[in-house]
Amino acid sequence: MLPLDRIFQLLPDAFTEPLSRKSFLQLAGKGVAAGVVGTLVASCKATETGAGTGASAASTGSTMNAPNGQTVPKTPPTSPPAQIPAGLEEPIKLEPWKSDADRQSGPTPTPLPPDRRVGYALVGLGHLTLEELLPAFGQCKKSKPVALVSGSPEKMRKVAQQYGIKPENCYSYQTYDQLKDNPEVQVIYIVLPNSMHAEYTIRGAQAGKHILCEKPMANSSAECQAMIDACQKANRKLMVAYRIQYEPFNRHARTLLRDKKFGETKFIEAFNCQSSANPQHWRHKKALAGGGALPDIGLYCLNTIRFLLGEEPTEVFAYQYSTPGNPLFKEVEELMSWQMRFPSGVVANCATHYNTHESRRYRVLCERGWLNMDPAFSYTGQQLKTSRAEGKLGKKEDVEMEHKNQFATELDHFSECILKDLEPFTPGQEGLQDHRIMEAIYQSAKENRPVKLPAVAKKDAFRGPEPKLD
């Protein structure tokens, strides 16, 4: 049997610290003490021979025994120092640990509780909704999907189960207007063929819901104006989903140009091209799409250049082409190439194509340097490079930033506008202006001549207030 001194060394701290030997014997009595001693001896033998597993393994104040008998250290739990603001939208500030020699981390995430997030009904369950939008809600802080609208009950049922959407929140196109009776839905996100945007935006506004509409906003500037008027009459907000204007790399490029880091901007070239293969897809039907490569992907060149400069073009000159006999281009254009002239003297050379390997880039030439974004218009993977001279040195830099989900960022911006009654950064007027310019581009290509546009003196004339993005 072990000496009493050794037994007390093996007792847990909770027993040994408050009790002396004398107190232990007085409280426990000799019989109990003997039982405890016997138990401890058995435990000691098990420990010394490596026996015992799980919770039965003996441990001391500074170590514990793993199931395999190995002794591992025990460290008291600690919480790092932190500043904890009261507001849910204010980030917790943890103690610093990086030096300024490394790129600094962003603020800690500040998600709202689920019951305070803005509820979205997604209309249309095609590629964009299933592949990008619904997954993006997982990275949102202020937005959540709560309803679906689809013409396919089977597909909608499966998607609803995957994303935890209630069966009673699943609607057909015939029951779409019943969204007005669903208080969980605050925003309707229109993700339909272009020709359906106007109808479902107008009906959605009449149902009392705010509207987020995919680009292009519609099939014509007249439809865009009708959408704007309907939302204004219903006192509902309307935003066009120009995700690039919320993407951090493109926003940083804009800052470099606006701050004239390379002097005055002089010339821009932009290309957005891809290869399509299904002539039956709605994008190749003029009645549904309104056009071909230009409104679908060429719009990114047009809208992003306007975003970068803050200016509006005063003249366009365009050329259009489709390969004869190609079934993809019986109704819509394969290629659109155009130039835009801006009040500052900047000329932009743009092209979009539906029948080449994908290329999504732009380069901005300035007095004292250039910046190149490639890819620029993709859903992810933006890469920004800059070049400038410094004395005898030529400096080319790769700009590194945190990539963020563009769809989550734009969703949360619109939710912020709903929660705080703000005007969206890309309202319906922004989409309307793009359609006016695209109509001038089509006219120029048809008439083979430059087409003038009304001069707009104000910078960022069609955008809302600058957003505060995390």
Image (cartoon, rainbow, N blue to C red):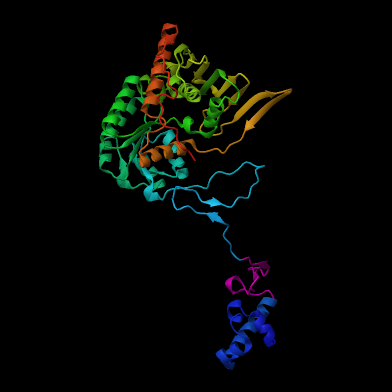
Return the residue nearer the eye: 466 or 125.
Answer: 466
**Residue at x 69%, y 83% (from the top left corner):** 6
**x and y percentages locating residue 338 in the rendered image:** 49, 14
Return the residue nearer the eye: 425 or 25.
Answer: 425
Name above or below for residue 226 compared with residue 247: above
**Residue at x 65%, y 79% (from the top left corner):** 10
State the image quarter where residue 147 is shown: top left
**Residue at x 53%, y 21% (from the top left corner):** 271
Name above or below for residue 354 compared with residue 23: above
**Residue at x 55%, y 89% (from the top left corner):** 27
In terms of secondary structure, what is the magenta stretch mainly? loop
**x and y percentages locating residue 366 in the rendered image:** 59, 20
Residue 70 lies in the magenta-colored region: yes
**x and y percentages locating residue 355 in the rendered image:** 51, 20
Residue segment shown in magenta: 49-75
Q: Residue furthest right?
A: 392
Q: In this image, 319 relative to 285: left or right?
A: right
Name above or below for residue 83 compared with residue 348: below
**x and y percentages locating residue 395 in the rendered image:** 69, 26
- Kindly tell me whether residue 120 is visible in this rendering: no
Residue 320 lies in the magenta-colored region: no
Name above or below for residue 289 compared with residue 77: above
